Amino acid sequence: QVRLSEIIGPLVRHFQEDRIVGGHPELVGFAADPDKDLTVEVDGRTVVGFIPWHGDSRWMAEPSHGGILRVHRRPQRGGETGFIDLISAYDRLPEALKQAIEGREAIVEFDSDPEILFRYHPHEIRVISAGSAIEAMRDRRGDFPPIVQPLVYRQPETGRTVLGFTPLPRQRVIGVAPEDSDALLARLAEHATDERHAYFHRWQDEDLVLWDNLRMLHQACGVPPGEEREVWRTTLAAPYPLARRLEDGGFAWKGQAA
């Protein structure tokens, strides 16, 4: 998996280094571990290892270009991974909302508080257990200084327009009142996480999935308690910055090159 990933592009380490697999710093594993990972009720259904709609490392000025995910242990039930495209999401925006976000930027801050993680989720979520991984990330806010990110950007390679919003981090729109910022972000979240436009991948043995993190949201749907699921992942390095740091210093992206 590492060798194949290096053919596609240069790799970076994942920031959760306790997930490294087999001594390979480029390879991390995500298992449905109720002690380590989130256990939540989604519309009354209990699942382990649930991660809501998000873009990876979108609280960094240079978020990863993509992920390459392979199923290592496949559950009998559940464990799907959802994907939503942010180019088509932008195209579907009402014209008035396109005008409202054109040229706007948001301050984005790293935060692992479950109330922040789920405040824009389209389903009713109740946290049963945050898990040790979430608790450990609470102490890492200093590693990721706030960034300023556009709500709309154009792909340098194609000129296509991408909705720059991702619902996971703590954020606020610059230049508008807090209540107006909250309302605008809530409208974008409702639009961007509309699951009528999502693809949910049902894993089969030997599956390997690659996605463009700069134009997509994804979600780990979790598994019922007692099911075993583990996926291994490599991460493609950023091709260019999408944002700028609010202030100098902090997380040294280039130092993470694998």
Image (cartoon, rainbow, N blue to C red):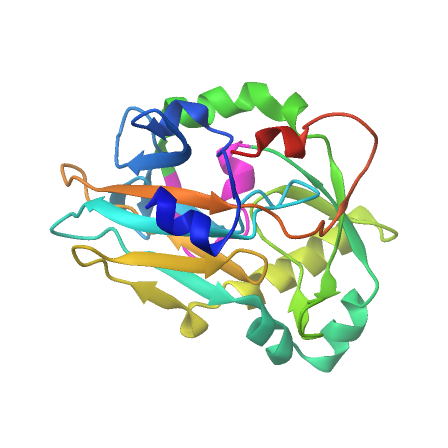
Residue at x 32%, y 46% (from the top left corner): 1
User: Which is nearer the eye, 149 or 193?
Assistant: 149
- Horizontal side of residue 86 vs 185, given as left or right: left
Residue at x 18%, y 59% (from the top left corner): 204
From this viewpoint, which residue is outermost toward the left?
76
Residue 29 image offset from top left, x and y in percent: 32, 35
Residue 233, located in which quarter of the rendered image?
top left
User: Which is nearer the eye, 109 or 96?
Assistant: 109
In this view, 83 is above or below 224: below
Residue 162, located in which quarter of the rendered image?
bottom right
- Residue 122 within the segment the image draws in magenta: yes
Residue at x 19%, y 44% (from the top left corner): 224
Residue 207, located in which quarter of the rendered image?
bottom left
Q: Is residue 124 visible?
A: no
Residue 32 image offset from top left, x and y in percent: 26, 36
Q: Is residue 211 visible?
A: yes
- Horizontal side of residue 219 vs 43, given as left or right: right
From this viewpoint, which residue is outermost toward the right?
175
- Residue 185 within the segment the image draws in magenta: no
The segment highlighted magenta reads 112-126
User: Which is nearer the eye, 120 or 208?
Assistant: 208
Q: Main secondary structure of the magenta part?
A: loop
Residue 106 image offset from top left, x and y in percent: 76, 50
In this view, 71 is above or below 194: above
- Horizontal side of residue 118 vs 4, given as left or right: right
Residue at x 44%, y 73% (from the top left corner): 197
Residue 97 image offset from top left, x and y in percent: 73, 73
How many labels were placed on the picture? Answer: 0
